[in-house]
Amino acid sequence: GFLCGVASDSVRCYLRHIKWLSHHDLSSGLPNRSALFALVKEVLTEQDEQSEAYVLAVISIENEKELLSTFGVSVLDSAVTQLVTRLQQKEAQIVSIYRINTMRLCVLIRCAPCLERERFFVQLSTLFREPVRFQDIPIHLDIRMGSVALTDEQLSPQAYLQQAESALAEACNKARDHVSFNPAISTASKENLVMLGELKNALTEKQLTLHYQPKVDMSSGKVHSVEALMRWNHPQKGNIPPGIFIPRAEDSTLINQITYFALNQAMAQMVLWQKSGISVPVAVNISARNLLQSDFCSVVSLLLERHGLSGEQLELEITEGVLMGDEQRAVAELNKLAQAKIILSIDDFGTGYSSLQYLHQLPVSFLKIDQSFVRRLPADKAAISIVEMAVSMAHKMNIRTIAEGIEDQATYDFLKNIGCDMAQGYLISRPLPAAEYALWHRQHNGCLG
Ligand code: C2E
Ligand code: MG
Ligand code: MG
């Protein structure tokens, strides 16, 4: 009987442990996702008009990969423990804290009016800004939060967590500390995923084409090069502008395939034009992500070789601001491209500010003044001084300038007067399909006026 009692005690103890495990995160001892779902379910069923309402918030360590690769797994456990201690200072509002995966905490908060709720999240962000310590090293955590109010008892705890996660994704995309969920967020992210899926098909189903727009030398009037601009002819939705689909592709690895397609297509076109007597370099727009692709320069060089072209015949346009984030890697890749004799331009100049300080280090030949300034010429004083400054600064660095988006003669004349080197815009030609561009080029004999 005694033995039996011992055995059943240890079985009970073991069962209790198993039960505990099923509701806790082993390394931190915090309740886990199942425990969270159980409590949310309880809260939702008990919630009536008089009682308190609640908010569910996901708190995520976004620089987790960097932390893991530098310090190993234990850094996350230590960071989480320190975050929990800070959260406990807010016990008046925070009902309970859960660890839902290695880098994410979830908290259930007593709901306050909207404005106060915002203030509460600002206070949390301030708490998180202080570095945590690991092996006596102060470590910065990049923390983002997404939250959702538990207002509808019909929704499942899983659905609420998903909404908080999509608010978190929005916070990451918009580089904000905290975002509260609203239905537009999940619609937008669903549309995004659908569009990315369709874009992938578009690549294989030949819905993507390039149109070409000339850039003209203002002193000689000769066509200097043509810019390839992507067009998506969607079978149901019609033309989708690159301003819509490129930024979405840029957030995923699909942009590498898009750029490869543009480069390959532009080079093939260049060769065709050459055969018909039109010899003109083509400029292709590339994205930040391309420069961070470690073998980007070799991909481009290989393509040039395959088409029998040399580096000088290809121009790459890189949007200003691209160099934010990982400047060193981007600059290293730009240098490789320049060594391969590829011509580099900074696109949309004036819209970012980050690369200004790096401009003198960059191996670029051209600066494209953004159309938002060009459009305001020749009347707007602020635009005039920015454009004049850009032209003189570029010239001091031996960089030539192009004005994009020129729509009228007055603007063209103004720019020519202040010494801008090249012009591009509807005044000269709209972006045209390849065959139409060839006609345009022949009509103008590769030269304006
Ligand atoms: P961007 O490279 O700065 O291209 C200039 C944009 O201005 C093009 O819009 C062009 O059609 C338009 N444009 C040209 N002249 C005029 C003008 O006189 N007036 C006005 N209002 N607009 C003018 P688009 O083709 O819609 O392209 C938008 C942006 O999408 C491009 O800006 C570029 O950043 C991106 N993009 C286009 N094709 C590609 C591509 O193949 N790859 C990548 N990564 N980005 C691309
Ligand atoms: Mg461009
Ligand atoms: Mg531009």
Image (tube, rainbow, N blue to C red):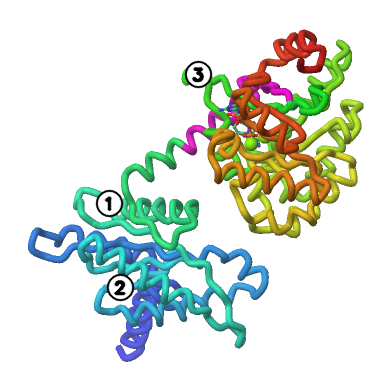
Which residue is label 2 attached to? 96
Q: Is residue 48 left or right of residue 126?
A: left
Residue mark closest to the camera, 2 vs 1: 2
Residue 195, magenta (yes or no): yes
Cα–Cα span, label 3 and label 1: 38 Å
In front: 304, or 363? 363
Residue type (three-letter) at the residue carrying disc 3: Gly
The stretch of residues the image draws in magenta is: 192-214
Which residue is label 1 attached to? 156
Quadrant in the picture for residue 203: top right
Whether residue 101 is visible here, answered yes or no, is: no
Quadrant in the picture for residue 360: bottom right
Q: Answer few, some or many: residues within 10 Å of disc 3's Cα (few below 14, many 20 plus, some between 14 and 19).
A: few
Q: Are marks 2 and 3 in contact (CB under 8 Å)?
A: no
Q: Secondary structure at mark 1?
A: loop
In front: 12, or 356? 356
Q: Residue 238 shows which numbered tag?
A: 3
At horizontal 33% and vertical 82% (from top left) the residue drawn is 89
